[in-house]
Image (cartoon, rainbow, N blue to C red):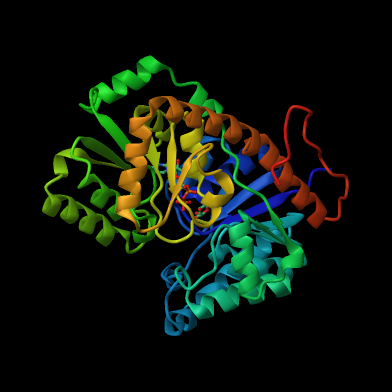
Protein backbone atom coordinates (compact mmCIF):
# COMPACT_ATOMS: atom_id res chain seq x y z
CA UNK A 1 0.00 0.00 0.00
CA UNK A 2 1.25 3.46 -0.85
CA UNK A 3 1.91 5.52 2.28
CA UNK A 4 -0.24 8.63 2.79
CA UNK A 5 2.06 11.63 3.11
CA UNK A 6 1.37 14.97 4.80
CA UNK A 7 3.73 17.52 3.21
CA UNK A 8 4.30 20.71 5.22
CA UNK A 9 5.78 23.98 3.94
CA UNK A 10 5.42 27.42 5.52
CA UNK A 11 5.56 29.44 2.29
CA UNK A 12 2.67 30.70 0.21
CA UNK A 13 5.05 32.02 -2.45
CA UNK A 14 6.81 30.01 -5.13
CA UNK A 15 10.49 29.76 -4.22
CA UNK A 16 12.76 26.98 -5.45
CA UNK A 17 11.90 24.70 -2.51
CA UNK A 18 8.19 25.05 -3.28
CA UNK A 19 8.67 24.39 -7.01
CA UNK A 20 10.61 21.26 -6.04
CA UNK A 21 7.78 20.15 -3.74
CA UNK A 22 5.25 20.78 -6.50
CA UNK A 23 7.05 18.27 -8.74
CA UNK A 24 7.08 15.68 -5.95
CA UNK A 25 3.41 15.97 -4.97
CA UNK A 26 2.29 16.15 -8.61
CA UNK A 27 3.88 12.73 -9.12
CA UNK A 28 2.18 11.21 -6.06
CA UNK A 29 -1.08 13.19 -6.01
CA UNK A 30 -3.38 10.43 -4.82
CA UNK A 31 -1.35 9.80 -1.66
CA UNK A 32 -0.45 13.42 -0.81
CA UNK A 33 -1.91 16.32 1.13
CA UNK A 34 -0.05 19.63 1.47
CA UNK A 35 -0.26 21.91 4.50
CA UNK A 36 0.86 25.52 4.16
CA UNK A 37 1.05 28.27 6.75
CA UNK A 38 -0.29 30.99 4.45
CA UNK A 39 -2.25 31.57 1.24
CA UNK A 40 -0.50 32.75 -1.91
CA UNK A 41 0.55 31.67 -5.42
CA UNK A 42 1.82 28.29 -4.18
CA UNK A 43 -1.59 27.51 -2.68
CA UNK A 44 -3.32 28.62 -5.90
CA UNK A 45 -1.02 26.47 -8.00
CA UNK A 46 -1.61 23.35 -5.91
CA UNK A 47 -5.37 23.91 -6.12
CA UNK A 48 -5.25 24.43 -9.89
CA UNK A 49 -3.41 21.13 -10.26
CA UNK A 50 -5.99 19.28 -8.18
CA UNK A 51 -3.62 18.63 -5.27
CA UNK A 52 -5.21 18.51 -1.79
CA UNK A 53 -4.05 21.51 0.24
CA UNK A 54 -4.96 23.08 3.58
CA UNK A 55 -3.77 26.33 5.15
CA UNK A 56 -3.28 26.15 8.93
CA UNK A 57 -4.59 28.91 11.15
CA UNK A 58 -1.18 30.49 11.53
CA UNK A 59 -0.06 32.96 14.08
CA UNK A 60 1.48 36.27 12.94
CA UNK A 61 4.13 35.86 15.63
CA UNK A 62 5.29 32.61 14.00
CA UNK A 63 5.14 33.93 10.43
CA UNK A 64 7.04 37.06 11.51
CA UNK A 65 10.06 35.14 12.84
CA UNK A 66 13.02 35.78 10.54
CA UNK A 67 15.90 33.38 9.95
CA UNK A 68 18.40 35.80 11.35
CA UNK A 69 16.00 37.21 13.96
CA UNK A 70 16.53 37.50 17.71
CA UNK A 71 15.44 35.46 20.72
CA UNK A 72 12.71 37.87 21.80
CA UNK A 73 10.74 37.25 18.60
CA UNK A 74 11.29 33.50 19.08
CA UNK A 75 9.89 33.65 22.62
CA UNK A 76 6.86 35.64 21.47
CA UNK A 77 6.17 32.94 18.86
CA UNK A 78 5.88 30.08 21.40
CA UNK A 79 2.09 30.25 21.99
CA UNK A 80 1.51 30.44 18.21
CA UNK A 81 3.80 27.45 17.66
CA UNK A 82 1.86 25.46 20.24
CA UNK A 83 -1.47 26.19 18.57
CA UNK A 84 -0.14 25.25 15.12
CA UNK A 85 1.45 22.03 16.43
CA UNK A 86 -1.90 21.01 17.93
CA UNK A 87 -3.74 21.63 14.63
CA UNK A 88 -1.14 19.68 12.66
CA UNK A 89 -1.01 16.84 15.16
CA UNK A 90 -4.72 16.26 14.65
CA UNK A 91 -4.29 16.11 10.87
CA UNK A 92 -1.15 13.94 11.10
CA UNK A 93 -3.10 11.06 12.64
CA UNK A 94 -4.75 10.42 9.25
CA UNK A 95 -1.38 10.01 7.51
CA UNK A 96 1.47 7.51 7.60
CA UNK A 97 4.31 10.03 7.52
CA UNK A 98 5.04 13.79 7.62
CA UNK A 99 7.43 15.54 5.25
CA UNK A 100 8.65 18.98 6.37
CA UNK A 101 9.96 21.06 3.47
CA UNK A 102 11.17 24.25 5.21
CA UNK A 103 12.65 25.46 8.49
CA UNK A 104 9.36 26.62 10.00
CA UNK A 105 7.78 23.38 8.77
CA UNK A 106 10.55 21.52 10.63
CA UNK A 107 9.67 23.20 13.92
CA UNK A 108 5.91 22.69 13.70
CA UNK A 109 6.07 19.42 11.73
CA UNK A 110 8.60 17.54 13.87
CA UNK A 111 6.74 18.31 17.10
CA UNK A 112 3.32 17.50 15.57
CA UNK A 113 4.55 14.22 14.06
CA UNK A 114 6.04 13.02 17.32
CA UNK A 115 2.92 14.03 19.25
CA UNK A 116 0.86 12.02 16.74
CA UNK A 117 3.26 9.05 16.82
CA UNK A 118 4.19 9.36 13.13
CA UNK A 119 7.62 9.24 11.42
CA UNK A 120 8.83 12.52 9.93
CA UNK A 121 11.29 13.49 7.18
CA UNK A 122 12.88 16.89 6.77
CA UNK A 123 13.97 18.22 3.39
CA UNK A 124 16.72 20.72 4.12
CA UNK A 125 17.06 23.23 1.27
CA UNK A 126 19.36 25.71 3.00
CA UNK A 127 23.01 26.00 3.90
CA UNK A 128 23.02 26.41 7.67
CA UNK A 129 25.60 29.14 8.12
CA UNK A 130 25.75 32.51 9.84
CA UNK A 131 25.13 34.19 6.44
CA UNK A 132 21.55 33.00 6.51
CA UNK A 133 20.61 31.95 10.06
CA UNK A 134 21.11 33.23 13.58
CA UNK A 135 23.12 30.91 15.85
CA UNK A 136 19.98 30.15 17.89
CA UNK A 137 18.01 29.14 14.79
CA UNK A 138 20.81 26.88 13.57
CA UNK A 139 21.01 25.22 16.98
CA UNK A 140 17.24 24.74 17.13
CA UNK A 141 17.14 23.25 13.62
CA UNK A 142 19.94 20.82 14.35
CA UNK A 143 18.48 19.88 17.73
CA UNK A 144 15.05 19.09 16.26
CA UNK A 145 16.61 17.20 13.37
CA UNK A 146 18.85 15.10 15.62
CA UNK A 147 16.12 14.37 18.18
CA UNK A 148 12.93 13.99 16.19
CA UNK A 149 13.55 13.66 12.47
CA UNK A 150 13.77 10.13 11.08
CA UNK A 151 15.62 11.12 7.94
CA UNK A 152 17.04 14.36 6.51
CA UNK A 153 17.07 14.85 2.74
CA UNK A 154 19.60 17.51 1.72
CA UNK A 155 19.69 19.19 -1.69
CA UNK A 156 23.50 19.06 -2.16
CA UNK A 157 26.78 17.99 -0.64
CA UNK A 158 27.33 21.65 0.33
CA UNK A 159 24.07 21.66 2.31
CA UNK A 160 25.03 18.35 3.92
CA UNK A 161 28.49 19.63 4.92
CA UNK A 162 27.04 22.75 6.58
CA UNK A 163 24.46 20.62 8.40
CA UNK A 164 27.28 18.41 9.71
CA UNK A 165 29.41 21.41 10.71
CA UNK A 166 26.46 22.78 12.69
CA UNK A 167 26.29 19.52 14.65
CA UNK A 168 23.71 17.68 12.52
CA UNK A 169 23.73 13.88 12.56
CA UNK A 170 25.14 12.94 9.14
CA UNK A 171 24.17 9.29 9.53
CA UNK A 172 20.61 10.14 8.76
CA UNK A 173 21.12 12.31 5.68
CA UNK A 174 20.75 11.52 1.97
CA UNK A 175 21.60 13.86 -0.87
CA UNK A 176 18.80 14.25 -3.37
CA UNK A 177 19.36 16.97 -5.95
CA UNK A 178 16.47 18.85 -7.52
CA UNK A 179 15.13 17.48 -10.78
CA UNK A 180 13.91 19.77 -13.54
CA UNK A 181 11.28 18.89 -16.13
CA UNK A 182 13.12 19.21 -19.46
CA UNK A 183 9.90 19.06 -21.51
CA UNK A 184 8.99 22.60 -20.40
CA UNK A 185 12.13 23.78 -22.19
CA UNK A 186 12.09 21.40 -25.16
CA UNK A 187 8.55 22.39 -26.12
CA UNK A 188 9.48 26.01 -26.90
CA UNK A 189 10.17 26.72 -30.56
CA UNK A 190 12.45 29.30 -32.19
CA UNK A 191 9.53 31.32 -33.54
CA UNK A 192 8.13 31.83 -30.03
CA UNK A 193 11.56 32.92 -28.81
CA UNK A 194 12.00 35.40 -31.68
CA UNK A 195 8.56 36.87 -30.95
CA UNK A 196 9.42 37.28 -27.29
CA UNK A 197 12.69 39.06 -28.07
CA UNK A 198 10.85 41.39 -30.42
CA UNK A 199 8.11 42.09 -27.89
CA UNK A 200 10.79 43.07 -25.38
CA UNK A 201 12.25 45.41 -28.03
CA UNK A 202 15.52 43.47 -27.91
CA UNK A 203 15.57 41.53 -31.17
CA UNK A 204 19.03 42.77 -32.17
CA UNK A 205 20.76 43.02 -28.82
CA UNK A 206 22.98 40.77 -26.73
CA UNK A 207 20.92 39.79 -23.70
CA UNK A 208 22.00 38.23 -20.43
CA UNK A 209 19.54 37.18 -17.72
CA UNK A 210 19.35 36.44 -14.03
CA UNK A 211 16.33 34.39 -12.96
CA UNK A 212 16.30 34.60 -9.17
CA UNK A 213 14.15 36.21 -6.52
CA UNK A 214 15.37 39.69 -5.65
CA UNK A 215 17.27 39.37 -2.40
CA UNK A 216 20.76 40.62 -1.50
CA UNK A 217 22.53 37.24 -1.51
CA UNK A 218 21.26 36.41 -5.00
CA UNK A 219 23.60 39.23 -6.05
CA UNK A 220 21.65 41.10 -8.73
CA UNK A 221 23.73 44.18 -7.80
CA UNK A 222 26.80 42.34 -9.13
CA UNK A 223 25.02 41.98 -12.46
CA UNK A 224 24.30 45.73 -12.57
CA UNK A 225 27.94 46.51 -11.87
CA UNK A 226 28.89 44.08 -14.64
CA UNK A 227 26.63 45.91 -17.10
CA UNK A 228 28.50 49.12 -16.35
CA UNK A 229 31.48 47.55 -18.16
CA UNK A 230 29.51 46.15 -21.11
CA UNK A 231 27.79 49.10 -22.80
CA UNK A 232 26.15 47.01 -25.55
CA UNK A 233 24.56 44.39 -23.33
CA UNK A 234 20.99 44.32 -22.00
CA UNK A 235 19.93 42.35 -18.92
CA UNK A 236 16.67 40.70 -17.90
CA UNK A 237 16.14 40.57 -14.15
CA UNK A 238 13.46 37.92 -13.80
CA UNK A 239 12.18 37.35 -10.27
CA UNK A 240 10.22 39.14 -7.59
CA UNK A 241 10.95 40.35 -4.07
CA UNK A 242 9.35 37.28 -2.47
CA UNK A 243 10.19 37.60 1.21
CA UNK A 244 9.98 40.15 4.03
CA UNK A 245 12.86 42.60 3.53
CA UNK A 246 13.40 42.04 -0.15
CA UNK A 247 11.41 45.07 -1.33
CA UNK A 248 14.12 47.36 0.05
CA UNK A 249 16.68 45.47 -2.02
CA UNK A 250 14.55 45.86 -5.15
CA UNK A 251 14.42 49.63 -4.54
CA UNK A 252 18.18 49.74 -4.05
CA UNK A 253 18.70 47.91 -7.35
CA UNK A 254 16.46 50.34 -9.21
CA UNK A 255 18.32 53.27 -7.62
CA UNK A 256 21.68 51.76 -8.53
CA UNK A 257 20.61 51.31 -12.16
CA UNK A 258 19.52 54.95 -12.22
CA UNK A 259 22.75 56.22 -10.65
CA UNK A 260 24.73 54.18 -13.20
CA UNK A 261 22.62 55.56 -16.07
CA UNK A 262 21.74 52.08 -17.35
CA UNK A 263 17.96 51.96 -16.81
CA UNK A 264 17.38 51.56 -20.57
CA UNK A 265 19.41 48.32 -20.51
CA UNK A 266 18.07 46.80 -17.28
CA UNK A 267 14.68 45.13 -17.61
CA UNK A 268 12.96 44.27 -14.34
CA UNK A 269 10.32 41.70 -15.28
CA UNK A 270 9.17 40.69 -11.78
CA UNK A 271 8.10 37.14 -10.91
CA UNK A 272 7.23 35.17 -14.06
CA UNK A 273 5.66 31.80 -14.74
CA UNK A 274 7.33 31.49 -18.16
CA UNK A 275 10.98 31.12 -17.10
CA UNK A 276 11.76 28.49 -19.80
CA UNK A 277 10.64 30.88 -22.58
CA UNK A 278 12.56 33.78 -21.08
CA UNK A 279 15.71 31.70 -20.62
CA UNK A 280 15.54 30.64 -24.25
CA UNK A 281 15.29 34.32 -25.21
CA UNK A 282 18.59 35.36 -23.63
CA UNK A 283 22.09 34.69 -24.94
CA UNK A 284 23.68 33.84 -21.58
CA UNK A 285 22.12 32.70 -18.28
CA UNK A 286 23.85 34.18 -15.25
CA UNK A 287 23.81 33.11 -11.64
CA UNK A 288 25.26 35.75 -9.34
CA UNK A 289 24.77 34.56 -5.74
CA UNK A 290 27.22 36.15 -3.35
CA UNK A 291 27.08 33.36 -0.77
CA UNK A 292 27.15 29.63 -1.50
CA UNK A 293 23.99 28.51 -3.29
CA UNK A 294 22.51 25.43 -1.56
CA UNK A 295 21.57 23.88 -4.92
CA UNK A 296 20.56 26.36 -7.66
CA UNK A 297 17.70 25.19 -9.86
CA UNK A 298 18.26 28.12 -12.22
CA UNK A 299 21.69 26.77 -13.17
CA UNK A 300 20.21 23.47 -14.35
CA UNK A 301 17.34 25.31 -16.03
CA UNK A 302 19.77 27.51 -17.98
CA UNK A 303 21.43 24.35 -19.26
CA UNK A 304 18.09 22.80 -20.24
CA UNK A 305 17.34 26.00 -22.17
CA UNK A 306 20.48 25.16 -24.15
CA UNK A 307 22.22 28.34 -23.02
CA UNK A 308 25.77 28.86 -21.79
CA UNK A 309 25.62 29.34 -18.01
CA UNK A 310 27.97 31.41 -15.86
CA UNK A 311 27.58 30.72 -12.14
CA UNK A 312 29.39 31.70 -8.99
CA UNK A 313 31.60 28.80 -7.94
CA UNK A 314 30.45 28.00 -4.43
CA UNK A 315 28.01 25.56 -2.84
CA UNK A 316 25.74 23.51 -5.10
CA UNK A 317 26.89 25.31 -8.27
CA UNK A 318 30.23 23.49 -8.00
CA UNK A 319 28.41 20.16 -7.88
CA UNK A 320 26.39 20.99 -11.00
CA UNK A 321 28.95 22.62 -13.29
CA UNK A 322 32.16 21.07 -14.57
CA UNK A 323 34.01 24.36 -15.11
CA UNK A 324 34.90 25.00 -18.75
CA UNK A 325 33.13 21.86 -19.93
CA UNK A 326 29.40 22.41 -19.40
CA UNK A 327 29.40 25.92 -17.93
CA UNK A 328 31.68 28.52 -16.37
CA UNK A 329 32.33 29.08 -12.67
CA UNK A 330 33.51 32.47 -11.46
CA UNK A 331 34.37 33.75 -7.97
CA UNK A 332 31.40 35.24 -6.07
CA UNK A 333 31.13 39.00 -5.54
CA UNK A 334 33.35 39.79 -8.50
CA UNK A 335 31.82 41.89 -11.31
CA UNK A 336 35.08 41.93 -13.32
CA UNK A 337 35.18 38.12 -13.32
CA UNK A 338 31.62 38.18 -14.68
CA UNK A 339 32.58 40.73 -17.35
CA UNK A 340 35.53 38.56 -18.44
CA UNK A 341 33.44 35.38 -18.51
CA UNK A 342 30.76 37.08 -20.66
CA UNK A 343 33.42 38.43 -23.04
CA UNK A 344 35.02 34.98 -23.26
CA UNK A 345 31.71 33.40 -24.31
CA UNK A 346 30.87 36.13 -26.80
CA UNK A 347 34.34 36.00 -28.39
CA UNK A 348 34.20 32.28 -29.15
CA UNK A 349 30.72 31.26 -30.33
CA UNK A 350 31.82 27.78 -31.46
CA UNK A 351 33.20 26.74 -28.05
CA UNK A 352 30.26 28.47 -26.37
CA UNK A 353 27.75 26.44 -28.35
CA UNK A 354 29.66 23.26 -27.53
CA UNK A 355 29.54 24.16 -23.83
CA UNK A 356 25.80 24.83 -23.95
CA UNK A 357 25.22 21.47 -25.66
CA UNK A 358 27.32 19.65 -23.06
CA UNK A 359 25.33 21.41 -20.32
CA UNK A 360 22.03 20.37 -21.85
CA UNK A 361 23.06 16.72 -22.09
CA UNK A 362 24.51 16.62 -18.60
CA UNK A 363 21.43 18.29 -17.08
CA UNK A 364 19.03 15.85 -18.78
CA UNK A 365 21.04 12.92 -17.51
CA UNK A 366 21.78 13.98 -13.93
CA UNK A 367 18.74 16.05 -13.01
CA UNK A 368 15.79 14.11 -14.37
CA UNK A 369 12.67 14.90 -12.38
CA UNK A 370 11.45 11.29 -12.65
CA UNK A 371 14.56 9.96 -10.90
CA UNK A 372 14.45 12.57 -8.17
CA UNK A 373 10.82 11.71 -7.46
CA UNK A 374 11.81 8.03 -7.15
CA UNK A 375 14.61 8.92 -4.73
CA UNK A 376 12.19 10.88 -2.56
CA UNK A 377 9.57 8.12 -2.69
CA UNK A 378 12.19 5.61 -1.58
CA UNK A 379 13.08 7.71 1.45
CA UNK A 380 9.39 8.01 2.32
CA UNK A 381 8.98 4.23 2.02
CA UNK A 382 11.99 3.61 4.25
CA UNK A 383 10.63 6.02 6.86
CA UNK A 384 7.41 4.01 7.11
CA UNK A 385 9.35 0.73 7.28
CA UNK A 386 8.74 -0.44 3.70
CA UNK A 387 12.07 -1.70 2.39
CA UNK A 388 10.78 -2.62 -1.05
CA UNK A 389 12.81 -0.05 -2.97
CA UNK A 390 11.66 1.48 -6.31
CA UNK A 391 14.31 1.38 -9.04
CA UNK A 392 15.18 3.60 -11.98
CA UNK A 393 14.22 2.57 -15.51
CA UNK A 394 17.11 1.32 -17.72
CA UNK A 395 17.32 4.61 -19.61
CA UNK A 396 17.74 6.67 -16.46
CA UNK A 397 20.84 7.27 -14.40
CA UNK A 398 20.90 7.56 -10.63
CA UNK A 399 20.88 11.08 -9.32
CA UNK A 400 23.04 10.54 -6.28
N1 LIG B 1 11.56 31.32 -10.84
C1 LIG B 1 10.28 31.52 -11.35
N2 LIG B 1 9.92 32.78 -11.70
C2 LIG B 1 10.75 33.84 -11.56
C3 LIG B 1 12.05 33.63 -11.01
C4 LIG B 1 12.42 32.36 -10.67
O1 LIG B 1 9.50 30.57 -11.52
O2 LIG B 1 10.34 34.94 -11.90
C5 LIG B 1 11.96 29.95 -10.49
C6 LIG B 1 13.20 29.45 -11.20
O3 LIG B 1 12.85 29.02 -12.50
C7 LIG B 1 13.67 28.35 -10.27
C8 LIG B 1 13.24 28.86 -8.90
O4 LIG B 1 12.31 29.92 -9.12
O5 LIG B 1 13.02 27.12 -10.56
C9 LIG B 1 14.37 29.36 -8.04
O6 LIG B 1 15.07 28.29 -7.55
P1 LIG B 1 16.60 28.33 -7.16
O7 LIG B 1 16.92 27.00 -6.64
O8 LIG B 1 17.42 28.81 -8.28
O9 LIG B 1 16.71 29.45 -6.01
P2 LIG B 1 15.84 29.75 -4.68
O10 LIG B 1 15.01 30.95 -4.99
O11 LIG B 1 15.05 28.56 -4.36
O12 LIG B 1 16.88 30.06 -3.63
C1 LIG C 1 16.46 26.74 -1.72
C2 LIG C 1 17.87 27.11 -2.12
C3 LIG C 1 18.19 26.81 -3.56
C4 LIG C 1 17.70 25.43 -3.94
C5 LIG C 1 16.23 25.30 -3.63
C6 LIG C 1 15.67 23.93 -3.97
O1 LIG C 1 15.53 27.70 -1.97
O2 LIG C 1 18.13 28.48 -1.87
O3 LIG C 1 19.57 26.88 -3.80
O4 LIG C 1 17.95 25.17 -5.30
O5 LIG C 1 16.03 25.50 -2.25
O6 LIG C 1 16.31 22.89 -3.27
- Residue 78 visible (yes or no): no
- Residue 339 visible (yes or no): yes
Q: Which residue lies at the image location 45% right of the left edge and 29% below the top edge?
A: 351
User: Is 261 drawn above or below residue 27 in the view shown?
Assistant: below
Q: Quadrant of residue 119?
A: bottom right
Q: Please state the horizontal and vertical placement of residue 191, each as a whole percent of the image.
A: 36, 15
Q: Please state the horizontal and vertical placement of residue 376, each as a whole percent of the image.
A: 70, 47
Judge from the rendering whether residue 285 lies leftward or rightward of residue 321; answer left or right: left
Q: Please state the horizontal and vertical placement of residue 296, each as a whole percent of the image.
A: 50, 49
Q: Quadrant of residue 73?
A: bottom left
For this rendering, which residue is in front, 205 or 100?
Answer: 205
Q: Which residue lies at the image location 54% right of the left edge and 61% below the top edge?
A: 126
Q: Which residue lies at the image location 34% right of the left edge and 47% below the top edge?
A: 338
User: Is 270 drawn above or below residue 182 in the view shown?
Assistant: below
For this rendering, which residue is in front, 174 or 333?
Answer: 333
Q: Please state the horizontal and vertical placement of residue 123, each as a whole percent of the image.
A: 63, 57
Q: Quadrant of the N terminus?
A: top right
For this rendering, which residue is in front, 108 or 202?
Answer: 202
User: Is 194 drawn above or below residue 126 in the view shown?
Assistant: above
Q: Which residue lies at the image location 30% right of the left edge and 24% below the top edge?
A: 196
Count the labels in the image.
0
Judge from the rendering whether residue 54 lies leftward or rightward of residue 2; answer left or right: left
User: Is 177 drawn above or below residue 170 in the view shown?
Assistant: above
Q: Quadrant of residue 139?
A: bottom right
Amino acid sequence: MKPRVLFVDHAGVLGGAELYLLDIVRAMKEQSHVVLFEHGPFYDRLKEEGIEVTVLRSSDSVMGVERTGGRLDDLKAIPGIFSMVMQLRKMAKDFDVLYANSQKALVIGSLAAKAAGRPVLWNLHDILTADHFSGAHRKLGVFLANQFIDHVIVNSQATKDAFGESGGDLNKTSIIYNGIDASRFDSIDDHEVAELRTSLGLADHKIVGVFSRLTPWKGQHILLETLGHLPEVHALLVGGALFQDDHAYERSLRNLAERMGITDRVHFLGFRDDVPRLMKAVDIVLHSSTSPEPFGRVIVEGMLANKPVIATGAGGAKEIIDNGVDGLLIPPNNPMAMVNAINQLVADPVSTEKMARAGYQMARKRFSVENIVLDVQNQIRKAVGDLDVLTYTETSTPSI
